[in-house]
Image (tube, grey):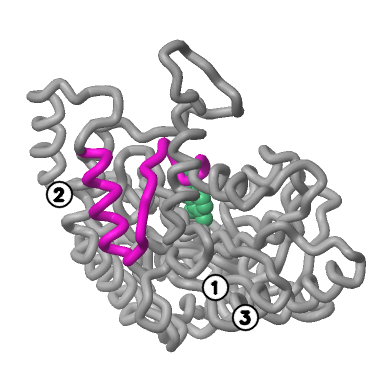
Amino acid sequence: MNKRIYLSPPHMSGEEQHYIAEAFATNWIAPLGPNVEEFERELAEYVGAKGALALSSGTAAIHLGLRLLGVGPGDTVFCSSLTFVASANPILYQGATPVFIDSEPETWNMSPGALERALRDAEAEGALPKAVVIVNLYGQSADMEPLLALCEKYGIPVLEDAAESLGATYKGKKSGTFGAFGVYSFNGNKIISTSGGGMLVSDDTEALEKARFWSTQARDAARHYQHSELGYNYRMSNILAGVGRGQLRVLDERIQARRAVFDRYVNALADVPGFAFMPEAESGFATRWLTALTVDPAQTGVSAAEIVDVLAEENIEARPVWKPLHLQPLFTGCKYYPHAEGHSVSDELFHNGICLPSGSSLTEEEQERVIQGIKRALKLYIETK
Ligand SMILES: *Cc1c(COP(=O)(O)O)cnc(C)c1O
Protein backbone atom coordinates (compact mmCIF):
# COMPACT_ATOMS: atom_id res chain seq x y z
CA MET A 1 0.00 0.00 0.00
CA ASN A 2 1.19 3.51 -0.83
CA LYS A 3 2.06 5.76 2.09
CA ARG A 4 -1.00 7.73 3.20
CA ILE A 5 -1.27 11.32 2.02
CA TYR A 6 -3.21 13.44 4.49
CA LEU A 7 -5.37 16.45 3.75
CA SER A 8 -3.53 18.88 6.04
CA PRO A 9 -1.14 17.30 8.56
CA PRO A 10 0.77 19.24 11.23
CA HIS A 11 4.16 20.54 10.05
CA MET A 12 6.61 21.28 12.85
CA SER A 13 9.64 23.51 12.29
CA GLY A 14 11.98 22.17 14.98
CA GLU A 15 11.92 25.59 16.71
CA GLU A 16 9.09 24.37 18.94
CA GLN A 17 11.53 22.12 20.86
CA HIS A 18 13.45 25.15 22.10
CA TYR A 19 10.42 26.72 23.76
CA ILE A 20 9.18 23.41 25.17
CA ALA A 21 12.62 22.63 26.61
CA GLU A 22 12.67 26.05 28.23
CA ALA A 23 9.29 25.37 29.83
CA PHE A 24 10.56 22.06 31.20
CA ALA A 25 13.84 23.53 32.43
CA THR A 26 12.03 26.24 34.39
CA ASN A 27 9.17 23.90 35.42
CA TRP A 28 6.67 26.22 33.75
CA ILE A 29 4.52 23.17 32.92
CA ALA A 30 1.50 24.79 34.54
CA PRO A 31 -0.24 27.07 35.14
CA LEU A 32 0.17 29.47 32.23
CA GLY A 33 3.70 30.88 32.12
CA PRO A 34 5.94 33.01 29.90
CA ASN A 35 5.28 31.12 26.64
CA VAL A 36 1.58 31.94 26.92
CA GLU A 37 2.24 35.65 27.43
CA GLU A 38 4.81 35.77 24.64
CA PHE A 39 2.65 33.78 22.21
CA GLU A 40 -0.19 36.24 22.81
CA ARG A 41 2.08 39.23 22.32
CA GLU A 42 3.72 37.80 19.19
CA LEU A 43 0.46 36.79 17.55
CA ALA A 44 -1.21 40.13 18.33
CA GLU A 45 1.78 41.89 16.80
CA TYR A 46 1.74 39.64 13.71
CA VAL A 47 -1.93 40.34 12.92
CA GLY A 48 -1.90 43.94 14.13
CA ALA A 49 -4.37 43.64 17.02
CA LYS A 50 -4.00 45.45 20.36
CA GLY A 51 -4.43 42.26 22.39
CA ALA A 52 -4.79 38.49 22.26
CA LEU A 53 -5.95 35.72 24.58
CA ALA A 54 -4.57 32.18 24.17
CA LEU A 55 -7.21 29.49 24.69
CA SER A 56 -7.68 25.74 24.55
CA SER A 57 -9.43 25.90 21.14
CA GLY A 58 -10.82 28.15 18.45
CA THR A 59 -14.29 27.02 19.52
CA ALA A 60 -13.63 28.32 23.05
CA ALA A 61 -12.53 31.65 21.52
CA ILE A 62 -15.79 31.93 19.55
CA HIS A 63 -17.75 31.10 22.70
CA LEU A 64 -16.04 33.80 24.77
CA GLY A 65 -16.35 36.31 21.91
CA LEU A 66 -20.10 35.77 21.68
CA ARG A 67 -20.48 36.08 25.44
CA LEU A 68 -18.52 39.35 25.37
CA LEU A 69 -20.98 40.60 22.74
CA GLY A 70 -23.80 39.87 25.17
CA VAL A 71 -25.32 36.95 23.24
CA GLY A 72 -27.75 35.08 25.47
CA PRO A 73 -30.99 33.10 25.57
CA GLY A 74 -33.64 34.37 23.17
CA ASP A 75 -31.15 36.21 20.93
CA THR A 76 -30.47 35.43 17.31
CA VAL A 77 -26.99 35.42 15.76
CA PHE A 78 -26.36 35.51 12.01
CA CYS A 79 -23.63 33.11 10.84
CA SER A 80 -22.11 31.97 7.55
CA SER A 81 -23.72 28.70 6.48
CA LEU A 82 -20.79 27.22 4.55
CA THR A 83 -18.44 26.43 7.43
CA PHE A 84 -17.39 23.92 10.05
CA VAL A 85 -19.96 23.33 12.79
CA ALA A 86 -17.66 24.99 15.39
CA SER A 87 -18.54 28.42 13.95
CA ALA A 88 -22.14 28.02 15.17
CA ASN A 89 -22.06 25.60 18.12
CA PRO A 90 -21.17 28.40 20.58
CA ILE A 91 -24.37 30.22 19.50
CA LEU A 92 -26.23 27.23 20.94
CA TYR A 93 -23.96 27.12 24.03
CA GLN A 94 -25.25 30.63 24.80
CA GLY A 95 -28.87 29.56 24.33
CA ALA A 96 -29.27 31.73 21.23
CA THR A 97 -30.61 30.80 17.78
CA PRO A 98 -28.54 30.94 14.58
CA VAL A 99 -29.79 32.32 11.26
CA PHE A 100 -27.65 31.11 8.38
CA ILE A 101 -26.37 33.28 5.54
CA ASP A 102 -25.27 31.89 2.17
CA SER A 103 -21.97 32.39 0.33
CA GLU A 104 -21.26 34.39 -2.80
CA PRO A 105 -19.34 32.86 -5.72
CA GLU A 106 -16.35 35.27 -5.71
CA THR A 107 -14.88 34.33 -2.31
CA TRP A 108 -17.15 31.40 -1.26
CA ASN A 109 -17.73 33.48 1.90
CA MET A 110 -20.74 35.40 3.24
CA SER A 111 -22.93 36.95 0.55
CA PRO A 112 -23.56 40.67 1.15
CA GLY A 113 -26.84 40.37 -0.78
CA ALA A 114 -28.10 37.59 1.47
CA LEU A 115 -26.95 39.44 4.60
CA GLU A 116 -28.79 42.57 3.47
CA ARG A 117 -32.09 40.71 2.97
CA ALA A 118 -31.69 38.96 6.33
CA LEU A 119 -31.03 42.25 8.16
CA ARG A 120 -33.95 44.00 6.44
CA ASP A 121 -36.33 41.17 7.42
CA ALA A 122 -35.00 41.09 10.98
CA GLU A 123 -35.52 44.83 11.35
CA ALA A 124 -39.07 44.57 10.00
CA GLU A 125 -39.77 41.87 12.58
CA GLY A 126 -38.17 43.94 15.34
CA ALA A 127 -35.67 41.15 15.96
CA LEU A 128 -32.23 42.30 14.84
CA PRO A 129 -29.42 39.82 15.63
CA LYS A 130 -27.10 40.34 18.59
CA ALA A 131 -24.02 39.59 16.45
CA VAL A 132 -22.91 38.45 12.99
CA VAL A 133 -20.31 35.65 12.71
CA ILE A 134 -18.42 36.09 9.44
CA VAL A 135 -16.29 33.09 8.48
CA ASN A 136 -13.21 33.20 6.20
CA LEU A 137 -13.01 29.84 4.48
CA TYR A 138 -10.03 27.86 3.24
CA GLY A 139 -7.53 30.69 3.81
CA GLN A 140 -9.46 33.52 2.15
CA SER A 141 -11.07 36.60 3.66
CA ALA A 142 -14.73 37.35 3.08
CA ASP A 143 -15.50 40.55 1.16
CA MET A 144 -15.41 42.54 4.40
CA GLU A 145 -16.18 46.06 3.16
CA PRO A 146 -19.82 45.60 2.09
CA LEU A 147 -20.45 43.15 4.96
CA LEU A 148 -19.10 45.57 7.59
CA ALA A 149 -20.99 48.49 6.04
CA LEU A 150 -24.26 46.57 6.42
CA CYS A 151 -23.49 45.55 10.01
CA GLU A 152 -22.59 49.14 10.85
CA LYS A 153 -25.77 50.47 9.26
CA TYR A 154 -27.83 48.25 11.57
CA GLY A 155 -25.47 48.62 14.54
CA ILE A 156 -24.63 44.92 14.80
CA PRO A 157 -21.15 43.86 16.02
CA VAL A 158 -19.10 41.35 14.04
CA LEU A 159 -17.18 38.33 15.28
CA GLU A 160 -14.72 37.16 12.65
CA ASP A 161 -14.07 33.41 12.52
CA ALA A 162 -10.57 33.45 11.02
CA ALA A 163 -9.76 29.91 12.17
CA GLU A 164 -8.86 29.01 8.58
CA SER A 165 -7.41 32.34 7.44
CA LEU A 166 -4.50 33.20 9.76
CA GLY A 167 -1.99 35.12 7.62
CA ALA A 168 -4.42 36.06 4.86
CA THR A 169 -5.11 39.74 4.16
CA TYR A 170 -7.99 41.86 2.88
CA LYS A 171 -7.02 45.22 1.36
CA GLY A 172 -3.65 44.93 3.09
CA LYS A 173 -5.03 44.27 6.59
CA LYS A 174 -4.74 40.89 8.30
CA SER A 175 -7.78 38.63 8.27
CA GLY A 176 -9.28 38.31 11.73
CA THR A 177 -8.86 41.98 12.67
CA PHE A 178 -11.99 43.44 11.06
CA GLY A 179 -14.65 42.64 13.65
CA ALA A 180 -15.03 43.55 17.31
CA PHE A 181 -13.38 40.17 17.94
CA GLY A 182 -11.36 37.77 15.79
CA VAL A 183 -10.73 34.08 16.30
CA TYR A 184 -7.87 31.81 15.20
CA SER A 185 -7.44 28.07 15.63
CA PHE A 186 -4.28 25.99 16.08
CA ASN A 187 -6.03 22.65 15.69
CA GLY A 188 -3.95 19.85 14.14
CA ASN A 189 -5.10 20.53 10.58
CA LYS A 190 -4.72 24.33 10.57
CA ILE A 191 -1.93 26.30 8.86
CA ILE A 192 0.03 26.35 12.12
CA SER A 193 -0.78 24.03 15.00
CA THR A 194 -0.25 23.70 18.72
CA SER A 195 -1.88 20.23 18.45
CA GLY A 196 -4.95 21.99 19.81
CA GLY A 197 -5.59 25.60 20.73
CA GLY A 198 -7.08 28.91 19.76
CA MET A 199 -6.74 32.68 20.12
CA LEU A 200 -9.19 35.51 20.62
CA VAL A 201 -7.94 38.89 19.37
CA SER A 202 -9.32 42.40 19.69
CA ASP A 203 -8.42 46.06 20.05
CA ASP A 204 -10.68 46.10 23.11
CA THR A 205 -8.14 44.99 25.71
CA GLU A 206 -10.62 45.52 28.56
CA ALA A 207 -12.99 43.01 26.98
CA LEU A 208 -10.09 40.56 26.58
CA GLU A 209 -9.37 40.90 30.31
CA LYS A 210 -12.97 39.92 31.03
CA ALA A 211 -12.62 36.88 28.77
CA ARG A 212 -9.33 36.00 30.48
CA PHE A 213 -11.20 35.99 33.81
CA TRP A 214 -13.99 33.75 32.46
CA SER A 215 -11.45 31.39 30.83
CA THR A 216 -9.84 30.55 34.20
CA GLN A 217 -13.03 29.64 36.12
CA ALA A 218 -13.99 33.27 36.87
CA ARG A 219 -12.22 33.29 40.18
CA ASP A 220 -12.85 36.47 42.18
CA ALA A 221 -9.96 38.38 43.76
CA ALA A 222 -10.23 36.83 47.23
CA ARG A 223 -7.95 34.74 49.42
CA HIS A 224 -10.39 31.82 49.36
CA TYR A 225 -12.07 30.33 46.29
CA GLN A 226 -14.92 32.66 45.50
CA HIS A 227 -17.01 32.85 42.33
CA SER A 228 -19.65 35.38 41.38
CA GLU A 229 -19.82 34.59 37.66
CA LEU A 230 -19.93 31.49 35.50
CA GLY A 231 -16.49 30.53 34.21
CA TYR A 232 -14.76 27.91 32.07
CA ASN A 233 -11.47 26.05 31.93
CA TYR A 234 -10.44 27.42 28.53
CA ARG A 235 -6.81 28.60 28.91
CA MET A 236 -3.93 27.35 26.76
CA SER A 237 -1.08 25.57 28.55
CA ASN A 238 2.47 26.95 28.65
CA ILE A 239 3.78 23.85 26.80
CA LEU A 240 1.37 24.26 23.90
CA ALA A 241 2.01 28.00 23.73
CA GLY A 242 5.69 27.04 23.27
CA VAL A 243 4.71 24.95 20.25
CA GLY A 244 2.74 27.94 18.98
CA ARG A 245 5.73 30.28 19.28
CA GLY A 246 7.87 27.90 17.24
CA GLN A 247 5.13 27.63 14.63
CA LEU A 248 4.51 31.36 14.39
CA ARG A 249 8.13 31.88 13.33
CA VAL A 250 7.54 29.86 10.15
CA LEU A 251 3.97 30.96 9.41
CA ASP A 252 4.91 33.04 6.35
CA GLU A 253 6.94 30.11 4.95
CA ARG A 254 3.95 27.84 5.48
CA ILE A 255 1.73 30.25 3.55
CA GLN A 256 4.17 30.32 0.63
CA ALA A 257 4.35 26.51 0.63
CA ARG A 258 0.54 26.16 0.58
CA ARG A 259 0.24 28.67 -2.21
CA ALA A 260 2.88 26.74 -4.18
CA VAL A 261 0.86 23.53 -3.68
CA PHE A 262 -2.20 25.34 -5.03
CA ASP A 263 -0.27 26.65 -8.07
CA ARG A 264 0.99 23.16 -8.93
CA TYR A 265 -2.57 21.78 -8.86
CA VAL A 266 -3.73 24.62 -11.09
CA ASN A 267 -0.88 24.06 -13.56
CA ALA A 268 -1.68 20.37 -13.81
CA LEU A 269 -5.49 20.48 -13.79
CA ALA A 270 -6.82 23.91 -14.77
CA ASP A 271 -7.39 22.76 -18.35
CA VAL A 272 -9.78 19.98 -17.34
CA PRO A 273 -13.20 21.12 -18.63
CA GLY A 274 -15.60 21.38 -15.68
CA PHE A 275 -12.91 21.97 -13.03
CA ALA A 276 -13.04 25.38 -11.33
CA PHE A 277 -10.62 26.28 -8.56
CA MET A 278 -11.73 28.49 -5.66
CA PRO A 279 -11.12 32.02 -6.93
CA GLU A 280 -8.78 34.44 -5.16
CA ALA A 281 -10.62 37.76 -4.90
CA GLU A 282 -8.65 40.82 -6.04
CA SER A 283 -9.31 42.50 -2.71
CA GLY A 284 -7.23 40.00 -0.78
CA PHE A 285 -4.30 37.65 -0.42
CA ALA A 286 -5.31 34.07 0.35
CA THR A 287 -3.11 31.56 2.17
CA ARG A 288 -4.67 28.65 0.22
CA TRP A 289 -4.91 26.77 3.52
CA LEU A 290 -6.73 24.13 1.51
CA THR A 291 -6.83 23.84 -2.28
CA ALA A 292 -10.53 23.64 -3.08
CA LEU A 293 -12.22 23.22 -6.44
CA THR A 294 -15.59 22.40 -7.91
CA VAL A 295 -16.31 19.68 -10.42
CA ASP A 296 -19.15 19.99 -12.92
CA PRO A 297 -20.19 16.37 -13.52
CA ALA A 298 -22.05 17.34 -16.71
CA GLN A 299 -18.67 18.30 -18.22
CA THR A 300 -16.28 15.87 -16.52
CA GLY A 301 -18.50 12.78 -16.44
CA VAL A 302 -17.42 12.25 -12.85
CA SER A 303 -18.75 13.69 -9.61
CA ALA A 304 -16.76 15.25 -6.78
CA ALA A 305 -17.74 12.31 -4.54
CA GLU A 306 -16.46 9.79 -7.11
CA ILE A 307 -13.09 11.56 -7.27
CA VAL A 308 -12.85 11.48 -3.46
CA ASP A 309 -13.57 7.71 -3.59
CA VAL A 310 -10.93 6.98 -6.25
CA LEU A 311 -8.33 8.96 -4.26
CA ALA A 312 -9.31 7.05 -1.09
CA GLU A 313 -8.53 3.78 -2.93
CA GLU A 314 -5.02 5.14 -3.41
CA ASN A 315 -4.69 6.04 0.27
CA ILE A 316 -5.08 9.75 -0.43
CA GLU A 317 -7.26 11.83 1.87
CA ALA A 318 -9.44 14.31 -0.03
CA ARG A 319 -12.62 15.74 1.46
CA PRO A 320 -15.89 17.23 0.27
CA VAL A 321 -16.32 20.94 0.90
CA TRP A 322 -18.07 21.69 4.26
CA LYS A 323 -21.69 20.60 4.40
CA PRO A 324 -23.55 23.89 4.92
CA LEU A 325 -24.98 24.33 8.39
CA HIS A 326 -28.50 25.06 7.11
CA LEU A 327 -28.49 21.45 5.79
CA GLN A 328 -27.30 19.92 9.10
CA PRO A 329 -29.82 17.90 11.14
CA LEU A 330 -28.58 19.77 14.25
CA PHE A 331 -29.93 23.04 12.84
CA THR A 332 -33.22 21.81 11.37
CA GLY A 333 -35.76 24.62 11.45
CA CYS A 334 -33.22 27.46 11.53
CA LYS A 335 -33.75 30.29 9.05
CA TYR A 336 -31.57 30.49 5.96
CA TYR A 337 -30.93 33.28 3.45
CA PRO A 338 -29.61 32.12 0.05
CA HIS A 339 -27.40 34.32 -2.14
CA ALA A 340 -30.41 35.09 -4.37
CA GLU A 341 -34.01 33.93 -4.17
CA GLY A 342 -34.00 30.32 -5.35
CA HIS A 343 -30.19 30.20 -5.74
CA SER A 344 -28.12 28.73 -2.92
CA VAL A 345 -24.38 28.98 -3.66
CA SER A 346 -23.33 26.92 -0.63
CA ASP A 347 -25.53 24.01 -1.72
CA GLU A 348 -23.74 23.96 -5.09
CA LEU A 349 -20.29 24.24 -3.51
CA PHE A 350 -21.13 21.37 -1.16
CA HIS A 351 -22.42 19.08 -3.91
CA ASN A 352 -19.60 19.78 -6.35
CA GLY A 353 -16.67 20.80 -4.16
CA ILE A 354 -13.51 18.92 -3.17
CA CYS A 355 -10.59 19.82 -0.92
CA LEU A 356 -7.29 18.27 -2.02
CA PRO A 357 -4.26 17.38 0.12
CA SER A 358 -2.70 20.78 0.80
CA GLY A 359 -0.18 20.38 3.62
CA SER A 360 2.88 22.62 3.60
CA SER A 361 5.01 19.45 3.94
CA LEU A 362 3.46 17.79 0.86
CA THR A 363 6.32 16.80 -1.47
CA GLU A 364 6.14 17.27 -5.24
CA GLU A 365 6.21 13.48 -5.65
CA GLU A 366 3.26 13.08 -3.31
CA GLN A 367 1.39 15.83 -5.09
CA GLU A 368 2.05 14.09 -8.42
CA ARG A 369 0.38 10.99 -6.96
CA VAL A 370 -2.71 13.06 -6.16
CA ILE A 371 -2.76 14.57 -9.65
CA GLN A 372 -2.37 11.15 -11.30
CA GLY A 373 -5.15 9.81 -9.05
CA ILE A 374 -7.49 12.55 -10.24
CA LYS A 375 -6.57 11.87 -13.87
CA ARG A 376 -7.25 8.17 -13.30
CA ALA A 377 -10.69 9.02 -11.86
CA LEU A 378 -11.51 11.16 -14.90
CA LYS A 379 -10.50 8.35 -17.31
CA LEU A 380 -12.22 5.61 -15.35
CA TYR A 381 -15.57 7.30 -15.39
CA ILE A 382 -15.36 8.54 -18.96
CA GLU A 383 -14.66 4.95 -20.06
CA THR A 384 -17.49 3.39 -18.07
CA LYS A 385 -20.27 5.91 -18.75
C1 LIG B 1 -11.15 24.66 12.91
C2 LIG B 1 -12.27 25.61 12.87
C3 LIG B 1 -12.88 26.09 14.03
C4 LIG B 1 -12.63 25.52 15.39
O1 LIG B 1 -11.38 25.57 15.86
P1 LIG B 1 -10.91 24.50 16.99
O2 LIG B 1 -9.61 25.02 17.41
O3 LIG B 1 -10.84 23.16 16.32
O4 LIG B 1 -11.94 24.53 18.08
C5 LIG B 1 -13.84 27.07 13.92
N1 LIG B 1 -14.21 27.54 12.72
C6 LIG B 1 -13.68 27.10 11.58
C7 LIG B 1 -14.13 27.69 10.30
C8 LIG B 1 -12.71 26.10 11.61
O5 LIG B 1 -12.21 25.63 10.45
Which amino acid does the dot numbered 1 rest on? Thr
Q: Is residue 87 visible?
A: yes
Nearest-to-viewer mark from 3 and 2:
3
Along the line of sight, the residue nearer the viewer: 7 or 114: 114
Q: Is residue 309 visible?
A: no
For numbered disc 1, what is the local secondary structure? strand
Vertically, is 60 above or below 337? above
Which is nearer the N-term, disc 2 or disc 1?
2
Tag 1 and tag 3, C-beta contact below 8 Å:
no
Residue 56 painted magenta: yes
Residue beneath disc 3? 149
Residue shown at the point (15%, 21%) measured from the top left: 27
Residue 28 - label: none
Which is nearer the N-term, disc 3 or disc 2?
2
Q: Is mark 2 within 8 Å of ligand 1?
A: no
Residue shown at the point (89%, 64%) measured from the top left: 126
Q: Is mark 3 within 8 Å of ligand 1?
A: no
Query: Which x, y percent locates residue 366?
Result: 25, 58
Q: Is residue 346 left or right of residue 47?
A: right
For numbered disc 3, what is the local secondary structure? helix
* Mark 3 neighbour density, 10 Å: few (under 14) some (14–19) many (20 or more): few
Which amino acid does the dot numbered 2 rest on? Ser
Query: Which x, y percent locates residue 68?
Result: 58, 48
Split into 4 quadrants, where in the image is the N terminus? top left
Residues drawn in magenta:
35-60
Residue 13 - label: 2
Vertically, is 319 above or below 144? above
Tag 2 and tag 1, C-beta contact below 8 Å:
no
Residue 294 - label: 1
Query: Which x, y percent locates residue 241?
Result: 26, 39
Nearest-to-viewer mark from 1 and 3:
3
Which is nearer the N-term, disc 1 or disc 3?
3
